[in-house]
Image: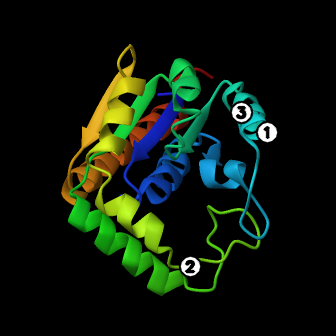
């Protein structure tokens, strides 16, 4: 697990999960929202986004959160692991609304500078309908993927995945810290 994509519906918890994976594994963290936006909610051009993504995935190790369908196939070609958050739509809408209320007027850590959280009706509808077109787009992008795909369908599955990753990280740290027996 050296190059990890975290994908799924808006509100599924992609950025939060990616940050936790980065913390547990030491993988460099890349947020697609930071690549796709400039300060003040100015969207970068398609060419600039692709250039930024190419630079990000050129690294040997990383965890990247976000869908951004236009660059998803490009990121899939370099990923060795895809974590697909396929949570119920109602839960994603609820989480999105909660996030807006919690961070209203503030810029989240996973966003470009000066992009304060806001309620966007179009984005809320997109989230509510994500299970159809959004899910099909993901499936098409992953059709030829040969790496490890992990699909998590509930918050409890996400917690169990993180607990397992935490145990593995602890085991690795313990093994590398253990004395070799040589003097």
Q: CA distance from mark 1 to mark 3?
A: 5 Å
Q: CA distance from mark 1 to mark 2?
A: 24 Å
| Marking on residue 123 | none
Whether residue 124 sits left or right of residue 28 in the image: it is: left
Q: Are marks 3 and 2 in contact (CB under 8 Å)?
A: no
| Quadrant (top left/top right/bottom left/bottom right) for the C terminus | top right
Whether residue 79 sits left or right of residue 115 in the image: it is: left
The type of colouring in the image is rainbow
Label 3, on which residue? Answer: 50
Label 2, on which residue? Answer: 118
Give the residue displayed 54% in from the left and 52% down from the top: 23
Percent position (x, y) of residue 3? 54, 29
> Helix or strand or loop: what does disc 1 sit on?
helix
Label 1, on which residue? Answer: 48
Q: Are marks 1 and 3 in contact (CB under 8 Å)?
A: yes
Percent position (x, y) of residue 62? 61, 35
Return the disc, 1 or 2, that comes first in the chain's sequence.
Answer: 1
The quarter of the picture where residue 41 lies is bottom right
- In this rendering, is residue 75 above or below 156? above
Q: Is residue 28 visible?
A: yes
Q: Please tell me how crowded label 2 is: few (under 14), some (14-19), or many (20+) other residues with Cα within 10 Å.
A: some
Give the residue displayed 50% in from the left and 79% down from the top: 119
């Amino acid at each position: 697990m050296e190059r990890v994509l975290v994908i799924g519906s808006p509100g599924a918890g992609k950025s939060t999960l990616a940050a936790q994976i980065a913390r547990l594994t030491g993988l460099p963290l890349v947020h697609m929202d930071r690549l796709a936006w400039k300060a003040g909610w100015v969207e970068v051009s398609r060419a600039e986004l692709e250039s930024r993504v190419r630079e990000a995935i050129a690294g040997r190790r990383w965890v990247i959160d976000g869908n951004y369908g236009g660059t998803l196939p490009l990121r899939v070609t370099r990923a060795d692991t895809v974590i697909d958050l396929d949570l119920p739509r109602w839960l994603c809408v609820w989480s999105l609304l909660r996030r807006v209320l919690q961070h209203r007027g503030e810029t989240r850590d996973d966003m470009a500078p000066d992009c304060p959280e806001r309620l966007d009706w179009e984005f809320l509808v997109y989230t509510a309908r994500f299970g159809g077109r959004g899910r099909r787009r993901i499936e098409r992008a992953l059709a030829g993927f040969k790496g490890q795909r992990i699909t998590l369908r509930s918050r409890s599955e996400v917690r169990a995945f993180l607990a397992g990753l935490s145990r593995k990280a602890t085991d690795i740290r313990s093994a590398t810290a253990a004395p070799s027996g040589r003097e």
